[in-house]
Amino acid sequence: MRRSFDEVQLGSIELFCLAAELGGFTAAAQVAGVTPAAVSRSVGRLEARLGVRLFVRTTRHIRLTEGGRGYFEQCRQALSQLIEAERQVSGQQLEAAGTLRISLPTTYGHHRVLPLLPAFRQRYPGVKVEVHLSNRNVDFVEEGYDLAIRVRAQPDSGLIARPLEEAALVVVATPAYLQQAGTPQGLDELAQHECIQFELPSSGRKISWLFNEQGREREIFTAGNYCCADDVLGGVTLASSGAGLFQTYRFIVERQLASGELVEVLQPFAGRSRPFTLLYPHGRHVPIRVRVFVEFLLQAAREWRGA
């Protein structure tokens, strides 16, 4: 059989897939232990070989082209098959086992991850799962966690960061509250409404509300007589009880919006989001229980994003 790939080309495919998964050359370089320039050169070699552009590049971001997206899906599957074949022939442990310790924010835990765990354990019955629900940042080494999910994760050279989704924000209230207080039509009208506050546990400051106004991003610090600290779900409960307006993630209130229990307001100013990121420590020998959960969760995130 004639050789189709050499070691450099296979390495370029791996780096291309990392860049596509992580959304950037710098992130891919950190995981692979090379420089961003090396990742860029590898992708350039692939593009020259294929005769197509794989990424649309700007000064701050990269985005897969249509051809790049199809190529990525094929390469990702092929690399997964190669890894599995290598494990089988080398006699490595194929069964995921042991205790998986996960730290989750309350919002993402209740509405995204916890509902998935029965299906995960059905696939990997040898894995026991311990979940810590909190919006506090954990210390992986000191507290012995395998993974964590965080909003607005800060760069950390000791951690691998895998983007999960940009969670859309909505402002909601009950029909009863809107009938009593009126429905705001513009952002300036928020000053006349009861806006439920959320206090960031890390800083103690009230979180701002995010909007799009005439093509520009706008940040507003609202005011109100209700404030929840640490748990965003408390604000949702208050809003569902008629206490006022609250900005939260759409995935949390989808059922209430569909049933009419809650109503979305200020829709012309929507479109903003906040990122959720999966974090786990660097290491040459990441336990198989961690690897399979990462892939399981990333697949679920692709479905949430409609990718």
Image (spheres, rainbow, N blue to C red):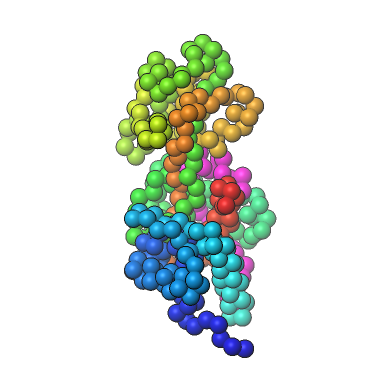
Q: Quadrant of residue 200?
A: top left
Who's the residue at 56% across and 40% down the image?
Answer: 111
The residue at 38%/68% (across/down) is: 40
* Residue 96 colored in magenta in the image: yes
- Where residue 91 sits: x, y (%)? 60, 79
The quarter of the displayed image where residue 88 is located: bottom right
Pick out the residue farthest to the top. 180
User: Is 68 a magenta residue?
Assistant: no
Quick one: which residue is furthest to the front in this view? 51
Determine if residue 290 is in view. Answer: no
Give the vertical position of 149 relative to 35 (above or below): above
Name the residue nearer the viewer: 22 or 196. 22
Image quadrant in which the N terminus is located: bottom right
In this view, 127 is above or below 138: below
Is residue 197 visible in the rendered image? The answer is yes
Foreground of the two, 40 or 305: 40
Q: Quadrant of residue 206?
A: top left
Q: Position of residue 58 (x, y in %)?
A: 37, 55
Q: Position of residue 116 (x, y in %)?
A: 61, 48
At a point 52% along the width and 48% down the height, the residue shown is 131
Residue placed furthest toward the bottom: 1
Magenta residues span 91-116
Tell which residue pokes out farthest to the right in this image: 122
Closer to us: 200 or 78: 78
Q: Is residue 218 left or right of residue 73?
A: left
Residue at image coords 40%, 43%: 136
The reply, left or right, for residue 205 in relation to residue 87 is left
How many numbered callouts?
Answer: 0
